C-alpha cells in the first residue's frame, strides 16, 4: 500500500469519527453529563493520535520512505504486546473497582465494555507513541 493512500485512509477514519461524534452530540436531547464530556475528550484524544500518525505517514510519503518498514513493524508489535499486558491489569482493576463503587446504570455491561475498549485503545496509542520516541532494545525479547 502506498504511503499516501495510507495517510488518506487515516485522515478518512479521523473524519468519520469526528462526524459521528458531532452527530451524537447534536442529536442528543438530554443535557450531557460529566461522563459524556469525558468520553468526548477521550475520543478527541484518539482522533488526535490518528491525525498525528496520518501526518507522519504523509511526511514519510513526501520524503519517499516506505510506510511499513521493519522498524515500524517491530514498534507496532512491541507496543501491541505491551498494551496487551497492561490492558489485562486494567481489566482486572476495572472489575475490582466495579464491585467497590456503585454504578447506577441500566446498561452496566455496555458501560464497562465501552470504557475497557477506549482504555485499551488509549494504552496502545500511548505505548506506540512512547516506543516511537524512545525506541526498542534489539537485545530484549
Image (cartoon, rainbow, N blue to C red):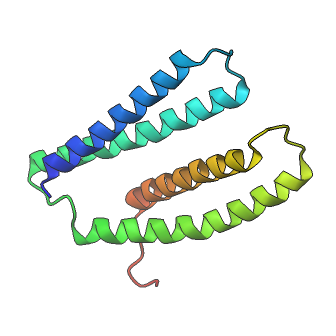
Residue 139 image point, x, y percent? 41, 85
- Please give left or right for residue 103 compared with residue 11 in the image: right
Residue 101 visible in this rendered orientation of the protein: yes
Image quadrant where one finds the N terminus: bottom left
- Which residue corresponds to the image point at 26% horizontal and 46% vertical from the top-left? 56
- Please give left or right for residue 107 compared with residue 66 in the image: right
Residue 60 visible in this rendered orientation of the protein: no
* Front residue of this view, candidates 31 and 63: 31
Judged from this view, the residue extending furthest toward the front is 106
- Which residue corresponds to the image point at 21% horizontal and 67% vertical from the top-left? 69
| Number of marks in the rendered image | 0
* Front residue of this view, candidates 77 and 9: 9
33 up-or-down from 104: above or below: above
Residue 111 in which image quadrant? top right
Residue 15 in which image quadrant? top left
Residue 91 image point, x, y percent? 70, 61
* Front residue of this view, candidates 106 and 40: 106
92 up-or-down from 32: above or below: below
Amino acid at each position: 500500500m502506498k504511503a499516501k493512500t495510507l495517510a488518506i485512509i487515516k485522515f478518512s477514519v479521523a473524519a468519520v469519527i469526528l462526524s459521528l461524534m458531532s452527530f451524537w452530540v447534536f442529536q442528543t436531547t438530554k443535557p450531557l453529563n460529566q461522563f459524556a464530556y469525558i468520553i468526548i475528550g477521550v475520543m478527541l484524544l484518539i482522533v488526535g493520535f490518528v491525525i498525528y500518525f496520518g501526518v507522519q505517514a504523509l511526511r514519510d510519503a513526501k520524503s519517499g520512505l516506505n510506510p511499513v518498514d521493519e522498524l515500524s513493524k517491530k514498534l507496532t508489535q512491541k507496543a501491541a504486546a505491551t498494551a496487551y499486558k497492561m490492558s489485562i491489569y486494567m481489566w482486572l482493576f476495572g472489575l475490582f473497582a466495579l464491585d467497590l463503587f456503585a454504578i447506577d446504570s441500566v446498561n452496566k455491561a455496555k458501560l464497562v465494555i465501552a470504557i475497557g475498549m477506549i482504555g485499551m485503545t488509549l494504552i496502545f496509542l500511548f505505548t506506540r507513541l512512547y516506543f516511537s520516541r524512545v525506541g526498542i532494545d534489539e537485545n530484549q525479547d
